[in-house]
Image (cartoon, rainbow, N blue to C red):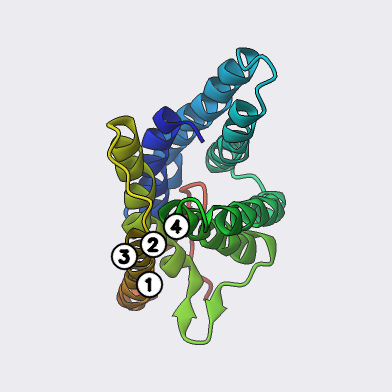
């Protein structure tokens, strides 16, 4: 994935996470999704056109399409209130590719292996929520957990990584990989804690007020 595109992905994950926890309305996040999605399609296309058959350049560029299509599609869902089930199943495909890259990167770049693993988890959550329609796991509200997971780990795995890479500051040691793994685990635990709090808070609010649908319309509570 191109570093410039990666720089932008962090903020769109962050904002989409805020949508999932009810801080930002879906339609207000749609323009950012469309902009970042378009950039994630345009930039790798320009790279591929000038790659002159270089397999290293091609292999580094094509994964950006997976994420670019994600944000374009999600932006359209937010604008037109489309059925997200197809998007959820597409996310399973993206998660599988991300998991493949995570395994592939372990030996050469343990830090990026953890980052790819983090993205695999994110897109797996999209699949479970939107493709399978599973919203809870035990007492854990998956919607809120996914939102906080994006908020806590989107910018560190994308924007911060891009800044370090663009400035030539990147460490690929096993120790750095372990630190990255610890950060992933801490983010997951933090997401679980915050999900419990926000789910309880929204439960209290929903008990006394109308719910908000995916496109932002107010829907009356059932009697």
Are the two marked residues, 2 and 4, in contact with CB atoms closer than 8 angstroms? Answer: yes
> Label 1 neighbourhood size at 10 Å, few (<14), some (14-19), many (20+)?
few
Is 154 on the left or on the right of 103, as rendered?
A: left
> Label 3 neighbourhood size at 10 Å, few (<14), some (14-19), many (20+)?
some
| Residue bearing the label numbered 1 | 185
Question: Dividing the picture into quarters, in which one does residue 73 lie?
Answer: top right
Label 3 secondary element: helix
Front-lying residue, 49 or 206: 49
Identify the disc placed on residue 179. Answer: 3
Q: Nearer the viewer's eye, disc 2 or disc 1?
A: 2
Question: Dividing the picture into quarters, in which one does residue 125 lie?
Answer: bottom right
> Label 2 neighbourhood size at 10 Å, few (<14), some (14-19), many (20+)?
some
Q: Nearer the viewer's eye, disc 1 or disc 3?
A: 3
Where residue 201 appears, x then y in whole percent? 30, 74
- What is the C-alpha distance between the residues marked 2 and 1? 17 Å
* Disc with the residue nearer the chain's start (2 vs 4): 4
Q: Residue at x 32, y 51 (%)?
A: 156
- What is the C-alpha distance between the residues marked 3 and 4? 10 Å
Label 4 secondary element: helix
Q: Residue at x 59, y 59 (%)?
A: 103
* Disc with the residue nearer the chain's start (2 vs 3): 2
Question: Dividing the picture into quarters, in which one does residue 158 lie?
Answer: top left
């Amino acid at each position: 994935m191109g570093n410039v595109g990666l720089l932008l992905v962090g903020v769109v994950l962050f904002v989409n996470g805020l949508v999932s926890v009810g801080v930002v309305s879906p339609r207000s996040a749609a323009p950012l999704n469309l902009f970042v999605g378009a950039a994630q399609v345009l930039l790798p296309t320009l790279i591929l056109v000038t790659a002159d058959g270089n397999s290293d350049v091609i292999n580094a560029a094509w994964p950006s399409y997976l994420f670019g299509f994600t944000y374009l599609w999600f932006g359209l869902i937010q604008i037109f209130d489309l059925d997200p089930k197809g998007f959820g199943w597409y996310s399973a495909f993206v998660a599988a590719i991300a998991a493949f890259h995570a395994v592939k990167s372990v030996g050469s770049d343990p830090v990026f292996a953890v980052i790819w693993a983090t993205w695999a988890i994110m897109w797996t959550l999209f699949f479970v929520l939107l493709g399978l329609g599973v919203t809870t796991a035990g007492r854990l509200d998956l919607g809120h957990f996914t939102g906080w997971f994006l908020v806590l780990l989107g910018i560190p795995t994308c924007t911060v990584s891009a800044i370090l890479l663009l400035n030539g500051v990147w460490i690929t040691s096993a120790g750095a990989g372990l630190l990255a793994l610890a950060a992933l685990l801490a983010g997951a635990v933090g997401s679980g804690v915050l999900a419990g709090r926000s789910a309880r808070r929204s439960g209290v609010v929903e008990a006394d007020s109308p719910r908000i649908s995916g496109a932002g319309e107010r829907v009356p509570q059932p009697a």
